[in-house]
């Protein structure tokens, strides 16, 4: 089990870094990547992330793609591998996570990804694909603010896929998204194990 950490919404984790390596398979490639204490799921590929990577439709082959809450980078790296002609943005406020993600992208041999804090993403970008295993445990208000910042920036034909545990409010989150005046529609794409993948797009 992954240890409890102060990773959520912590720019500078207080725990000692203590880097370690893990072996993961992303887009059919077995990679040795770096993780550390003070980041999300430091011991393994999180099960929800694995469900998203296995169950989401193919990302856009071009344009700007977004990973909200990138952690040490598995979603962003997968997007970059699957869409080598697109540009991927992995955003997180945890600077330790961003450092790990950059080194992991280099280890995976992908150079079409930028890892940065949210304020460093150009404000005029619209995203063809958004993938996220959103940080549910930050609390409802913070989670809603996070999604309110990014989901309305979908391109006209863009699609977002979010993976959320059933017992942590996937159905209520779907309902909340549909209640917003963003011009977006959220539906349930699939269910697997304890997770649902939600799909968000313009009607």
Image: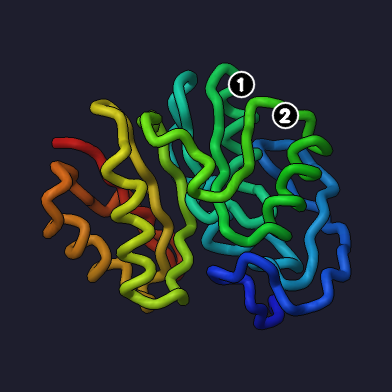
Mark 1 surroundings within 10 Å by alpha-carbon count, few (fewer than 14), some (14 through 19), many (20 or more): some
Q: Which residue is mark 1?
A: 84
Q: Is residue 72 left or right of residue 149?
A: right
The residue depicted at 34 percent of the width and 56 percent of the height is 147
Looking at the image, residue 57 sits to the left or right of residue 75; the answer is: left
Please tell me whether mark 1 sits on a helix, a strand or a loop. loop
Q: Position of residue 65 (x, y in %)?
A: 47, 33
Give the SS element for disc 2: loop
Residue 107: which quarter of the image?
top right
The residue beneath circle 2 is 110
Q: Is residue 165 left or right of residue 203?
A: right
For the residue pair 171 and 128, the one nearer the viewer reads as: 128
Q: Where is residue 158 shown, x and y percent of the image?
A: 31, 31
Quarter-wise, where is residue 159 in the image? Answer: top left
- Residue in the image at 19% along x and 64% along y: 176
Along the viewing direction, whichever of 97 and 168 lies nearer the viewer: 97
């Amino acid at each position: 089990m992954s240890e409890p950490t102060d990773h959520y919404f912590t720019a500078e984790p207080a725990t000692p870094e203590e880097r370690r390596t893990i072996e993961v398979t992303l887009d059919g490639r077995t990679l040795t990547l770096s993780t550390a204490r003070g980041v999300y799921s430091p011991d393994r590929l999180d099960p929800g992330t694995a469900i998203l990577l296995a169950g989401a439709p193919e990302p856009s082959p071009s344009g700007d793609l977004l990973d909200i809450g990138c952690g040490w980078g598995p979603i962003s790296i997968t997007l970059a591998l699957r869409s080598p002609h697109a540009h991927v943005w992995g955003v997180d406020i945890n600077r330790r996570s961003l450092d790990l993600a950059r080194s992991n992208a280099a280890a995976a041999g992908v150079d079409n990804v930028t890892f940065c804090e949210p304020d460093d993403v150009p404000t005029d970008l619209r995203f063809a694909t958004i993938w996220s295993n959103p940080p549910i445990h930050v609390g409802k208000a913070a989670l809603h603010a996070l999604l309110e910042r990014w989901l309305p920036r979908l391109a006209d034909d863009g699609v977002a896929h979010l993976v959320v545990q059933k017992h942590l409010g996937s159905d209520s989150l779907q309902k909340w998204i549909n209640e917003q005046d963003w011009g977006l529609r959220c539906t349930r794409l699939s269910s697997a194990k304890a997770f649902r993948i939600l799909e968000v797009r313009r009607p």
